[in-house]
Image (cartoon, helix red, strand yellow):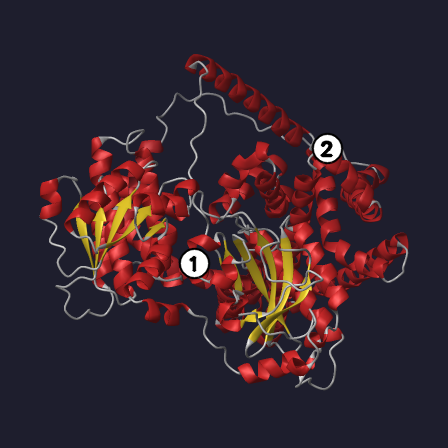
Amino acid sequence: MSNVAEPRNVRTGPDDESDPSERRQLNIVSFAAALLSATIILGALYYGRDICVPLATAFLISFALNPPVTWLARRGLPRVAATALVMGVLLVVLSGLGFLLAAQVRTLAVELPAYQSTILRKLSDIREKLSAPGAFSGALQTIERVQKEVTSEPPTAQGPAAQRVEVVPTSQTPFEQAFAWLSRSLEPLTVAGIIFIFVFLALVDRTDLRDRLLRLLGSDVHRSTESMEEAGTRVSKYLLMQMTVNVSYGIPMALGLWLIGVPGALLWGCLAAVLRFVPYLGPLISSMFPVALAFATDAGWSMVLWTVTLIVVLELVSNNIVEPLLYGSSTGLSAISLITAAMFWTALWGPAGLILSTPLTVCLLVFGRNLPQLQFLDTLLGSTPALDLPTRIYQRLIASDPDEAIELANERIEASSLREFYNDVGIEVLRRASEDYLRNATAAHRLRFAMGMDALLDELMEEGPPKIEDRAKATVICIGGKWEVDAIAARIVAHALEFEGIAAEARPAATVNRHYVEQLALKGTETVCLSYFSENPVIPARHFTRRLRIRWPNLRIVLAFWNAPLELLEEATRERIGVEAVVNSVDEAVRRIHRIVAPEAARDAQQAEMPEHDEERVAALEATGLLDGNHREALDAMAKRAADVFNASIAVISTIDDQHEYFVGQSGDLPSALTDEAGALLPMARRDAICNYVVASEETLVVPDIERDPRFADNEAIRRWGVRFYAGSAVRSKDGFVLGAFCILDDEPRSLQEGEVELLEKMAAEVGATIADGAVTEPHTAAHSLPATATVGQRVPE
């Protein structure tokens, strides 16, 4: 879990000067070309199914068999031999299972005539019960009589009786019968042989096939490689999970039927496991055989009832416990896309298409996720929402559906917190509304949005913070600068401040003039927060600030520029307008205002907490010998690799004891930081270290812009470094203690994608493994008394 906040920087794109008629004509041509291409592809898949089905089956089987083949190859066995061994074992297992099932089939064939009397007697009983008079017998007889009258043919004149002609087929010779049987048998055997050969070749020539597919996918090797790796991983995981689910269903089925006494229990268990590869229809078909046999075997009805109960219980357990536990999000397909894909591939390839539908659709989803030309497939097939949460809430509001918007907001708040919802979602919703205000929104849309946001905020405020004493004397007044969205943002900030324990109040959007300022009634108020969604709010903010200063000279003012470019958030803007702070997020506004209103309490509240068992953690750190300079060369190399991988200015590996942060690995220099003669970073006080937050939370911390976070922007020791971006992941000892952090730093604001955060965490785990492999056996309790060098504990210069 990572703590990631995205920096906001709004840029307007260039104007589109092309002719609208030319764009429409281009869109029509593109649509026609896409439609023609799709028709050709579908025609090729349909008419070439005799070739496509074996090929698709072979490649999917190769996905499932590739992990054991690769495992054997990595242990020195030639790949051809590894492939032959795996496929040989598979053939032996399948052949043995086939002979065993064939024996059970022969036994059932011999015993079936003995069940004839039981079947006839039960059918006779059922017929008698159905033919007995009931409540609807009279109505049914009336309907039958009317139907007979309607469908009866009128009488015709008598003529010569028609003679019946019977065509007697000519009898086949024994040779013709044998040839016909052989022809029917050779077709599946031929398909199986083709699949076997293709599987063998796909496993042996895997690297060559991968290279050829990369060439076909285009020149972007990075994107194509990601697509192939993700497709292979997802399909392999799906097949493995499907096999596990089927076996976990088939074995209890066979044991249960054996205990009940149904003949051929092993056969029906294997059939149930195999047919579950067929989505939706497979379980239904597999359950018909044991139920029918129980009906034919038992003279009573107990065996049928027990068999049905067994099947229902296994289905409930498999569908509600086993499958959710094993599958998770292994395929990434939505439920409706699974059903649609099953219908589509069945229409193209018949029953084989039904079995192959899910793996093939997974491949299409992965390619659509990674190739720009096929991104519509990700939208159509993927399980991830097509719209992000702010857009979904915004759409519900302009569609006059505030109830669903409130439901979406509550779901997000339950997963995080109200303040995080306001910071990551609430302001983003207002940002979309401000961008559409003069572009696409009509008067009705604006009214629906304003009323919907009022309802949403009223609902959230009903579960607000504990009541603040003496609310009449609000410490902070939040005022909308101009538009309705500015006033809504002011309400959001006021509510977030109350969660911090600061008495706050929101006022409507301002009409800045002398009369309005005189009526504000700010007596007893210490701080005012002015909210603006304009892309260039400097002039109105300066005008409003000047009038406030004239009336209340000691008033402290914070400007919230939600939609302004990053350059307007710099220190120069604050000094030019003459305010205490300029912020652009709810989180920054709350922290900054808290520091203005109650500096000491804010510093204490925003300081990293001391982790549990900190003494044991420090002892584990000293036991590694890192403070003596151990592993310095290896850790420097790992930091250098991280700086290159993430294209960062510098990467460092830090450790934190009870008092200080020490840098045991470093990739480069920070010109403004405190270093020794060799350029190595000097230690800093633990209370000033960003990595202390990583140690406290034991989670990855990403700070897109240090100057936007009051916890670090006001820290003189950090400001001396001259960095704007920080990302740090926990470095753990072999016992699980967080020794420090693996950090990348940059002199420009930036952010990390989810995959990059996972990569940083993986590299931090490698650092922990490197440290654990060479850990010393006795702790160095006197590390701070050793000579002063770059790798040994030093005091921070005052």
Tell which circle, 1 or 2, labels the residue nearer the N-terminal end: 1
Q: Residue 495 lies in what quarter of the image?
A: bottom left
Identified at 81% across, 45% down, the residue is 207
Judge the density around disc 2: few (<14), some (14-19), many (≥20) Cα neighbours within 10 Å: few
Q: Is residue 113 visible?
A: no
Q: Looking at the rendered structure, which numbered label has been put on residue 400?
A: none
**Location of residue 714 in the rendering, given as x and y in whole percent from the top left corner:** 43, 60
* Amino acid type, mark 2: Leu
Q: Is residue 555 left or right of residue 706?
A: left
The x and y percentages for residue 759 are: 63, 56
Residue located beneath label 2 in the image: 216
> Where residue 36 sits in the image (x, y, percent)?
58, 21
The residue nearer to you, when weighing 309 against 103, is 309
In what element is the residue under mark 1? helix
Q: Is residue 490 above or below residue 31?
A: below
Q: Nearer the viewer, mark 1 or mark 2?
A: 2
User: For this rendering, which residue is in front, 464 or 644?
Assistant: 644
Left or right placement of residue 783 versus residue 92 in this view: left
Q: Is residue 764 left or right of residue 182?
A: left
The residue wearing badge 1 is 127
How far across and down, in percent of the image, does residue 601 sit?
33, 71
Give above or below for 533 relative to 320.
above
In the image, what residue occupies the spot 11% across and 43% down?
516
